[in-house]
Amino acid sequence: MIDDTYLKLSIHKAFLGHIGTNIRAIAYDYTNICIFIYAYLNQEPRDDDFEIIDRAATEILADFPQLESQDITLIKTANPIASLNAHKGWIFVRYEN
């Protein structure tokens, strides 16, 4: 079983320095064997966006040997952040007027 508090600390540590300028928000979810990362962007995702988030997700996997995989979803959206699915919680939310 995954300790929620330790997972949240691991996620926030992993994403320090791993959030690109076109990312509006990042949410997470997980099961006993997989971490899911959902990044909401203000433009079409670039290869760099995926690679940066993939590095952070790999750091999370290193902290939790029971997690066997990661699933990263990049979503271009102009919808208000308050209307986006936070899943189990927000990792990052950019301030927007």
Image (spheres, rainbow, N blue to C red):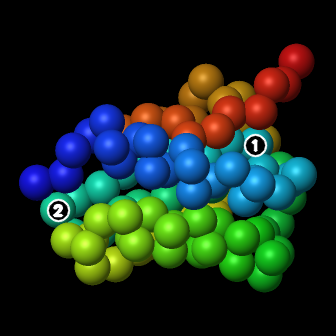
Could you tell me which residue is drawn at 64 percent across and 67 percent down? 53
Q: What is the spatial separation of the Cα atoms under label 1 and label 2, in whole angstroms? A: 27 Å
Closer to the camera: disc 1 or disc 2?
2
Label 2: how many Cα within 10 Å (few below 14, some 14–19, many 20+): few
Image spot of residue 67 (x, y percent)? 27, 71
Question: What is the crowding at mark 1: few (fewer than 14 residues within 10 Å), some, or many (at least 20)?
Answer: many
Vertical order, 5 against 56 (above or below): above
* Up-down relation of residue 26 to residue 47 (above or below): above
The quadrant in which residue 14 appears is bottom right
- Say which of 58 and 22 sits in front: 58
Measuring 76% from the left and 43% from the top, which residue is drawn there?
Answer: 24
Mark 1 belongs to which amino acid? Arg
Secondary element at tag 2:
loop
Residue 32, which numbered label? Answer: 2
Q: Position of 62 compared to 32: left or right?
A: right
Q: Position of residue 92 (x, y in %)?
A: 64, 38
Q: What is the x, y in percent for residue 37?
A: 49, 59
What amino acid does circle 2 point to?
Asn
Q: Nearer the viewer, residue 10 or 53?
A: 10
Picture quarter with the C terminus = top right
- Left of 74 or right of it: where is 49? right
With respect to residue 63, does 54 lie above or below?
below
Q: Which residue is mark 1?
A: 24
Location of the N terminus by quadrant is bottom left
Q: Going by the image, does 49 lie left or right of 28?
A: right
